[in-house]
Image (cartoon, helix red, strand yellow):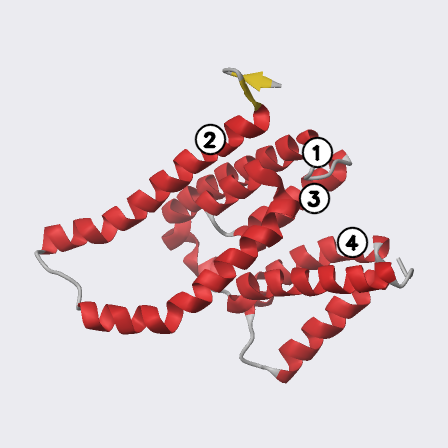
Amino acid sequence: MKKNNLSYLESVHRDGRIWGISICILIFLFPLACCIIFNTIPDWKALGQGLLATLPMYWAVGLVEIFTYVPMLGAGGTYLSFVTGNISNLKLPCAIDAMERAEVKATSEEGEIISTIAIAVSSIVTTLIIILGVIFLIPLSPILDSPILKPAFDMILPALFGGLAVVFISKNAKLSVAPIILMLALFISVPALNASTVGIMVPVGVLFTVGVARIMYKKGKL
């Protein structure tokens, strides 16, 4: 497949780099605009201390996510999901479910296209829901804050991942045992791990599973 004498993947990488760099520039322009508008500058010492404590973790997670998500989402899906965000909670489940239904793999050109379309549609739907939420937030607040509905809202994410887990665990029963035990042990023994750490724990679980799969494959158990 050619586009302006470029293959599909070449055009994906070209456009993905352009949009990725553009988003980075826009992100940095916001604090710059705030500094100009309010005629102030950051406390560089405090900023440096804060970055020293947090930046190493985010660099590590960022590198791990690159190697984790690309094989699962494909190049186009990875670029788009990194630009739009909320990967582990929304984009990843949508892409995996779409490819599962289409019976394609992310490493194929068909999988690349399906994954990218699924993530794009997910982003559009999310944006529309956010717009509706902003419009109807105040009128619907009494209903959304109802104690009766709170348990349902708390279970949305577990239900989403649970549905996906059933499909993949049933197909890879042997391989699923190790990561399940690891995650249960971690979350039970370290209560500080909660929903906010999903972005970190998903890549950790993936890398651990890949390592276990390689060991099991060499021993002829897969």
Sequence-wise first label, 1 or 3:
3
Judging by the rendered image, the residue that carries numbered circle 1 is: 108
Give the residue displayed 66% in from the left and 61% down from the top. Answer: 207
Q: Quadrant of the N terminus?
A: top right
Q: Give the camera-side residue of 20 and 92.
A: 20
Sequence-wise first label, 2 or 4:
2
> What secondary structure is marked by label 4?
helix
Sequence-wise first label, 3 or 4:
3
Give the class, few, some or many, for how many residues have Cα within 10 Å of label 2's Cα (few <14, many ≥20).
few
132 versus 174 height, above or below = above
> Which dot marks residue 168?
4
Judging by the rendered image, the residue that carries numbered circle 3 is: 97
> Which dot marks residue 213?
none
> What secondary structure is marked by label 3?
helix
Structural distance between the alpha carbons of marks 4 and 1: 19 Å
> What secondary structure is marked by label 1?
loop
Q: Locate residue 62 relative to residue 189 in the image: left or right.
A: left
Q: Position of residue 39 (x, y in %)?
A: 8, 56
Sequence-wise first label, 2 or 3:
2
Sequence-wise first label, 1 or 2:
2
Give the class, few, some or many, for how many residues have Cα within 10 Å of label 4's Cα (few <14, many ≥20).
few
Structural distance between the alpha carbons of marks 1 and 2: 19 Å
For badge 3, the amino acid type reads: Asp
Mark closer to the observer (2, 4): 2
Sequence-wise first label, 4 or 1:
1
For badge 4, the amino acid type reads: Phe
> Which dot marks residue 14?
2
Structural distance between the alpha carbons of marks 2 and 3: 27 Å
Q: How many marks?
A: 4
Q: Position of residue 13 (x, y in %)?
A: 50, 33
For badge 1, the amino acid type reads: Ser
Structural distance between the alpha carbons of marks 2 and 4: 33 Å
